[in-house]
Amino acid sequence: MAKNAKGEVWTLAELRDGKLHPVSYELLAWGRGVADALGVPLASVVLGDNPPDPESLFQRGADKAYLADNPGLKHYLTDVWARVLGDMAREYAPQILIASATTQGRSAMSVLYAKQGCGLTADCTGLSVRDGALLQTRPAIGGNVMADIMTPEHRPQMCTVRPKSKRPLPPDLSRKGQVVRYAPKKDALASALTFLGFDAESRVGLPIQDAEVVVSGGKGMKGAKNFALLDELARLLGGSVGASRSAVDLGWAPHSSQVGLSGKSVTPRLYIACGISGAVQHLAGMSGAETVIAINTDPEAPIFGVADFGVVGSALEILPRLIDDLKKGGAR
Ligand SMILES: Cc1cc2nc3c(=O)[nH]c(=O)nc-3n(C[C@H](O)[C@H](O)[C@H](O)COP(=O)(O)OP(=O)(O)OC[C@H]3O[C@@H](n4cnc5c(N)ncnc54)[C@H](O)[C@@H]3O)c2cc1C
């Protein structure tokens, strides 16, 4: 696609159960900075069956909302999303398309970029503008360096950004925007996939990326059965259970609970790291936590370097006592 310096910046909104997911607003916070630096409008694209009123998208920074509305868009299907987005990009020629590095964003964008023959920078943690083009920053080589990536020749410039890597802009209730209704082409809606159903994983509390409290366990928890202590503490604190990659690799916790570079980024108010050493790849996923408590037998463990409160001792002894105290005193 040809370069278009006046092209809009687009973000891909996501729906869950027909409602706008918070990542839609995080993307607008990224997109607003980029669109302002380029002096072009910021638009949010929503695909769905009767998508919700886009008012909240305008309040969080969008100037425009493209609503692709069709019963065939009721459930997310990668091939359909990529085709509809591709048709829209050809028709409206945005210069930048930003999606979230969620399952939906990652899969739709990777099919779309292959079809468009342009680039895609996945999992960005920073976006800015250099020489009128998008500068995409992401960790590389195991998180040891930050790579700056640009796509000088191809349009749209496409990237995914990590959920929770930016807070949404505070809502400005006076902001209004323009709604563009888009009717997807019939052949774009024909899918090779059939939606069978959605099975939510059973776990304590919210998905970790949405939780206010995350109680995480690592190899120092010594076994899957001891994760029951983390479940109990999370339940008492109204939080969710996370894990290090070692604990996930050992099968003690599901991959969906992995915190870190190759897992999820979390920004809870409280992060409790139990038996986690604090490897740089783990810290990459939880450094946005407001308060960190670490429990570790090794006083030299790197996790203590980022902890606000540290307890040197065995998590297997300390957690039962903490749970008992909370039960007696009530979780405040
Ligand atoms: C490309 C790449 C991506 C990666 N991505 C991730 C990622 O997303 N997330 C991630 O977590 N890691 C990731 N890793 C792995 C990372 O480097 C570490 O290996 C991993 O985080 C270590 O997990 P851990 O802290 O549970 O285990 P360990 O490093 O083995 O630490 C266990 C800790 O438990 C303590 N301990 C032992 N017994 C007890 C006890 N009874 N009570 C309390 N503490 C105790 C020990 O002192 C130790 O500090 C990645 C690595 C690479 C190369």
Image (tube, grey):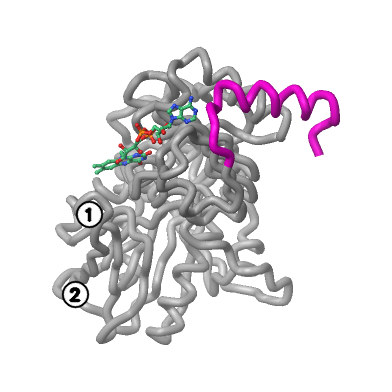
For residue 180, say whether it is visible: no
The amino acid on which the numbered mark 1 sits, given as a three-letter code, is Tyr
Query: Residue farthest to the top?
Result: 225
Residue found at the very far right of the displayed protein: 329
Asked which secondary structure carries label 2, the reply is: loop
Give left or right: position of 231 versus 278.
right
**Dot 1 crowding, Cα within 10 Å, few <14, some 14–19, many 20+:** many
> What secondary structure is the magenta-colored segment mainly?
helix
Between 144 and 52, the one lying in front of the other is 144
Mark drawn on residue 113: 1
Say which residue appears at 85% left-offset and 30% top-offset. 329
Q: Which residues are magenta?
A: 311-332
Image location of residue 293, percent across then percent down = 59, 44
Which quarter is ligand 1 in? top left
Q: Which residue is found at the position 32% from the left and 66% from the top?
A: 91
173 w.r.t. 15: above or below? below
Q: Is residue 146 left or right of residue 204?
A: left
> How far from the left and from the top, in percent, is residue 70?
49, 44
Residue contact at pointers 2 and 1, CB within 8 angstroms: no
Residue plotted at (56% across, 21% down):
316
The amino acid sitting under disc 2 is Ala
- Residue 323 in the magenta stretch? The answer is yes
